[in-house]
Amino acid sequence: MSAQVSSNRAFFQQLKKYYTWYTGGFFAFVIALAILEQMGLTRQWIGYIFLFATIGLYAGIGIMSRTSDAAEYYVAGRRVPALFNGMATGADWMSAASFIGMAGGLYLQGFDGLAFIMGWTGGYCLVALFLAPYLRKFGQFTIPDFLGARYEGNAARAIGVFAAILCSFVYVIAQIYGVGLITSRFTGVDFTVGVFLGLAGILVCSFLGGMRAVTWTQVAQYIILIVAYMIPVVWLSVKQTGVPVPQLVYGGQLQKVDAKDRAFRTDPKEIEVRDIFKARAAEAKARIDALPKSWEDGKAAAAKKVEDLKTANAPVADIRAAEKALADYPASPDAAKVAWQRQVTGNTARSAPPLPMAEPFATNKTGEAGEKERDVKRLNFLTLIFCLMVGTAALPHILMRYYTTPSVNEARVSVFWSLFFIFLLYFTAPALAVLVKFDVYTNVVGQSFANLPAWVGAWQKVDPTLLSIVDINKDGIVQLAEMSIGQDIIVLATPEIAGLPYVISGLVAAGGLAAALSTADGLLLTIANALSHDVYYKMVNPNASTQRRVTISKILLLVVALIAAWVTSLKPGDILFLVGAAFSLAASAFFPALVLGVFWKRANRAGAVAGMFVGLGICMYYMLRTYPFFTNMWPEWKMALWFDIAPISSGIFGMPAGLLTIIVVSLLTKAPSQQIQEFVDHVRYPNIKGSPREGAPAYMGH
Amino acid sequence: MQLSPQQKEYWAKNLRLTAVLLAIWFFVTYVFGWFALSLSKVIIPVLNFPAAYYIAAQGALIVYVLILFYYAKKMRSYDVQYGVDEGEQ
């Protein structure tokens, strides 16, 4: 034992040394690039260098950590110290959505967006109190493993495998999508090329070294992403307040932004612009009401315009524009209805006054309707937090990480470190949102179109869905209502907003890439392990040799990665909405069975199987019948919301239903065997004297 | 395998600690969340933040981190006290 302890300690010291050098080297690399930029290195090259240097680095770590040993491949040899497992979990956890989208969401949604901040951190309390230490004591390889052992057999395991693959696959598509987006935007390569470049980085790493390589890469990725996130926001804070700790001082800025939001609601110029949008919406509505005649008239008018311009010998550009308008004209009255309905929705949305940023559950409705809307918003805020928290404590790629620590105690400490490292980014995101909004309200809104900051023009050119400012009321001044801003621009444009050199923009892109790649790594590994370990080894061929299992796992990893990349390259934009769904699905399928498995000895096989089935079933049923992604495909399936709960929070129905089903069915059927009861005791105590210290007891079959 | 009284007490202590920490977690998340609107007019002195926004954006998160820190520390001491620890680490 003590030899083991001192070797663990030496390993920890060694890791500390490596990663300190690595961090120093990374800073030196960024500074060198900054100097090169001053000497004339082009932006495109900075993008390339960041892309290839970081992917090369991850691949290098992968090659150094290559292994074909099962314990190393599946759980990194169970010797990852708590601190480093915390960093790896942080990178595993923080996805492209957290890194790029979160601050933007807070910018657009104000207080209500904080549900994601609370949900995605508070969930770790459930991980620590209910799961991590017990799963570590159990000490096998996957989450379905636990279900299979605790609930005696393959039925529970099979549902677990299905649910693990379902939520991980939707999630991994979103990550690969993020990889493609970042690489194509910052280097100019095609989206699909970007996807496969990123995939190469993921694969070299996880293919060669499994969990071991993924863990050490994720630690490296965490360091890059946290540095990349902090630098621009600290700089912005210094610029605005003179204090380099944005998290402490953004309260004052928040109040100023909130006051401006309130002022914009009654500003006559703002109202003028919003009224123009209101009129546009009404006009589109009138056209829909006059179908099909309005469609014929519009088509004739568009054709006539082309003719008129041609006979009048108008400039070529005008004729081209008119021809394009004619070509883009809806092909049929039905298509026109869809397109014009979109105009109604879009213009109506833009005619709404801004909501005060710091006000909880803000609404534009007044009187009784306003009270009701507030209550609905509050209910959805709280249920969303609940689903995100319970989902966090049930996502297999996160829980799996706690198998890799050397002991139960280290697993507990490791959850603390995980949350601490996640907390660093999550309590900075609101600061970033507020500071950027303050900058926009000061340097863009109210300024004349002639002298807008350079970043505004640059980003409008990149992608009008990310940023577009059009002088709607032709007064030459930017009104807030004239600006439409996309969620993803906030983090990506912060370095330019703060006036930092382009190398920092490249760094932020590298950070976003690290966030997306690290999460994708963990997810792909989860899917491949569920298939190779749980399906192949535990269900199909229990006599397979270790060597064979690892080889099968690697092949599956490759196959799953290619399928995921292929699905992503189809750009299924709509599917990204489903990422939030992964949390509700995981919460409904796994949480009750896992927690009752540890805390209630009476829970048995029949109860767990029924409970997982019911929980997952209800959650999926509610989503299929309320999520716009599905209801647009099968309109006749659409149903009214239950208690006004948004589809993303369907776990609020699935999880309690699953919990209740397990309890009721377990009580109606026979108690689990003595062996299982002893298994539960084994999991509950870090060390029960009388059982051997090392190795698993006989009933675990190893 | 029969559990000793000491081991049973360890599990009871564990359950109690879990329940207490869970109650704190529930309070800062949901009780606060329910009353967020009434807190939004209050400005926290010194920090200069609107109270509702501060709690949701920072306060609750800090409490979560502290909960986990305390849990790991306290459970380790229970492990040693009730003789179920994994030995020197």
Image (cartoon, coloured by chain):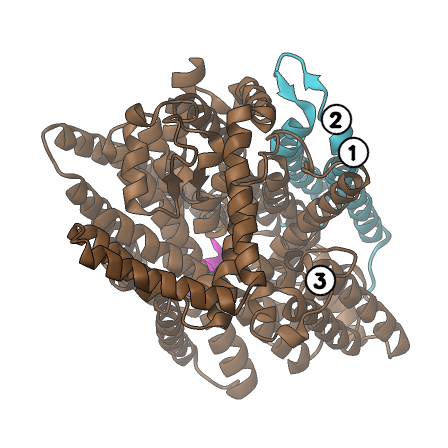
Chain colours: A brown, B cyan
Q: Which quarter of the figure is the C terminus of chain A placed in?
A: bottom right
* Magenta stretch secondary structure, dominant: helix
**Residue at (65%, 39%) from the top-left corner?**
B68
- Residue A353 found in image quarter: top right
Label 1 neighbour load within 10 Å: few <14, some 14-19, many 20+: few
Where residue B65 appears, as percent x and y from the top left, is 62, 36
Q: Is residue A455 above or below residue B26?
A: above
A498 sits to left or right of A84: left
Magenta span covers which residues? A71-79
Nearer to us in this view, A466 or A229: A466
Which residue is label 2 attached to?
B39
Which residue is label 3 attached to?
A682
Q: Is residue B37 above or below residue A701?
A: above
Identify the secondary structure beneath mark 2: helix
- Residue B35: assigned label: 1
Nearer to us in this view, A266 or A200: A266
Disc 2 to disc 1: CB gap under 8 Å: yes
Where residue A318 appears, as percent x and y from the top left, is 23, 51
Identify the secondary structure beneath mark 1: loop
Q: Chain of mark 2?
A: B
Q: Amino acid at mark 1?
A: Phe
Q: Amino acid at mark 2?
A: Leu
Q: Residue furthest right?
A: A668
